[in-house]
Image: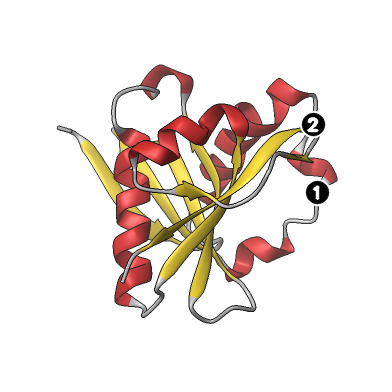
Amino acid sequence: MEGIVISRINIQDERYPQVYELREEILRKPIGLSLKNEDLSADAQNDIFIAENANEVIGCVMLHPIADEEKIKLRQMAVHSRWQGQGIGRMLVEAAEAYAKEKGYSSIILHARQVAEPFYKKLGYYTTSSVFTEVGIPHVVMEKDIF
């Protein structure tokens, strides 16, 4: 997509506050929660992928290491409402998958909001759990082999 740049950043990057605001606006406010009430210390361990257009962060997703050295967790996917449905999420996931593969991981796991399950299925993820509640809404565990 023309004008969209995908980058990998960390929490020290000057664009991280825009990532925080995007996550707050897209992932927390609609369900009556706030990142201000959450422990975000794990963000320091994440590889953060952002989509930018004209120096504005319009999408983000994070890769978080877990105890299983073969797998890495995809989390906190958010795309600005103006940009949803235009392939930004796909671009972010594909960038994260390529990076994870390069780093030697064999699969990616994630906790998908049940409403996002079809999006991840289109990208080759398969559901590995029954529905459970996380942050007050239905989720499923999904996984994709990337080796």
Q: Position of residue 5 (x, y in %)?
A: 25, 44
- Dot 1 falls on a residue whose secondary structure is loop
Type of residue at label 1? Glu
Judging by the rendered image, the residue that carries numbered circle 2 is 33
Please indicate whether residue 139 sits to the left or right of residue 68 in the image.
Answer: right
> Is there any visible trace of residue 95 in the rendered image?
yes
When the figure is inspected, residue 68 is found, relative to residue 51, above or below; the finding is: below
When the figure is inspected, residue 100 is found, relative to residue 134, above or below; the finding is: below
Q: Are discs 2 and 1 less than 8 Å apart at CB? A: yes
Type of residue at label 2? Leu
- In the image, what residue occupies the spot 29% across and 24% down? 86
- In the image, what residue occupies the spot 29% across and 48% down? 6
Mark 1, residues whose alpha carbon is within 10 Å: few (<14), some, or many (≥20)? few
Q: Position of residue 88 (x, y in %)?
A: 33, 35
Q: Earlier in the sequence, mark 2 or mark 1?
A: 2
When the figure is inspected, residue 39 is found, relative to residue 124, above or below; the finding is: below
Quarter of the image for the C terminus: give it. Answer: bottom left
Q: How is the image coloured?
A: secondary structure
Mark 2, residues whose alpha carbon is within 10 Å: few (<14), some, or many (≥20)? some
Q: Nearer the viewer, residue 47 or 18?
A: 47
Judging by the rendered image, the residue that carries numbered circle 1 is 38
Quarter of the image for the N terminus: give it. Answer: top left
- In the image, what residue occupies the spot 40% across and 23% down? 84
Please indicate whether residue 49 sits to the left or right of residue 69 in the image.
Answer: left
- Distance of mark 2 from mark 1, alpha carbons? 9 Å
Please indicate whether residue 14 sits to the left or right of residue 45 in the image.
Answer: left
